[in-house]
Amino acid sequence: MPTVEADPGPFSFAPESTALLVIDMQRDFLLPGGFGESLGNDVAQLRCTIEPLTALLAAGRAAGLKIIHTREGHLPDLSDCPPAKLRRGPMIGKEGPFGRILIRGEYGHDIIDELRPEAGEPVVDKPGKGAFYATDLSKILDNDGIKSLIVTGVTTEVCVHTTVREANDRGYECLVIKDCVGSYFPEFQRVGLRMIAAQGGIFGWVADSPAVIAALQE
Ligand code: C5J
């Protein structure tokens, strides 16, 4: 069974029951000139994940891992966007440089070209930060007997963290890939990753992508 050197200890996984989860690698969050940048964020802090994630995806596909992508966003009429979220994110649904911000079907809502899903890879649209809330993710994982998740994407302390916490409570073993998750805030990246593996791995494990790629290729 492939085993990866990780924090707080070795992480072993069976490829046939492991999914590689790619969270919210969307243009609205990652493109220069987009929604994320318009909030004053430095998108370079997220864009540094693209290259390692491209390599990890290639290795995951070659090893036969199930690949699942997610996108955060809402229906055009915003009926699935809680008023409380809209009050604190008033730009959601407004016209931006890449279409209506975080609205399904708009250019900015979709996944960046570099990480475009391949045919047959599920794309889970989620209205919340967690990938389990109000989605079919549990069913998709159950149907394929998935027990372990290799977690990547953005942002580390928001959608990645929420999803890992949801997954951990549902009994999945989560390995978070440190160079394949990104935050606009270096401090949140550092502390977010520490929080996953603290206290003996309270939410899961943390490792580098080269270690996972090497394990997949053994
Ligand atoms: C945020 C996300 N940060 N995908 N979304 O609002 O983490």
Image (cartoon, grey):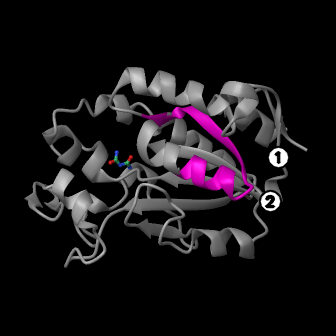
Locate residue 49, reporting x and y percent: 45, 35
Circles 1 and 2: CB distance less than 8 Å?
Answer: yes
Disc 2: CA contacts within 10 A as few (<14), some (14-19) or many (>=20): some
Question: Does 168 lie within the magenta span?
Answer: yes
Q: Is residue 155 visible?
A: no
- The N terminus, quarter of image: top right
Q: Nearer the viewer, residue 139 or 195?
A: 195
Locate residue 141, reporting x and y percent: 68, 68
Locate residue 87, reporting x and y percent: 17, 56
Find the distance from the CA under tag 1 to the CA under tag 2.
Answer: 8 Å
| Helix, strand or loop for disc 2 | helix
Q: Residue furthest right?
A: 1
Beta carbon at label 1 within 8 Å of ligand 1: no
Figure check: 8 above or below 171: above
Q: Residue at x 45, y 27 (%)?
A: 189
Q: State the residue position of label 1.
A: 13
Q: Which residues are magenta?
A: 163-182
- The residue type indicated by label 1 comes to Phe
Q: Is residue 92 left or right of residue 44?
A: left
Number of labels in the image equals 2
Which image quarter: residue 80?
Answer: bottom left
Q: State the residue position of label 2.
A: 17
Question: Does 77 lie within the magenta span?
Answer: no
Q: Residue at x 54, y 52 (%)?
A: 163
Locate residue 213, reporting x and y percent: 70, 37
Q: Is residue 103 left or right of residue 123?
A: left
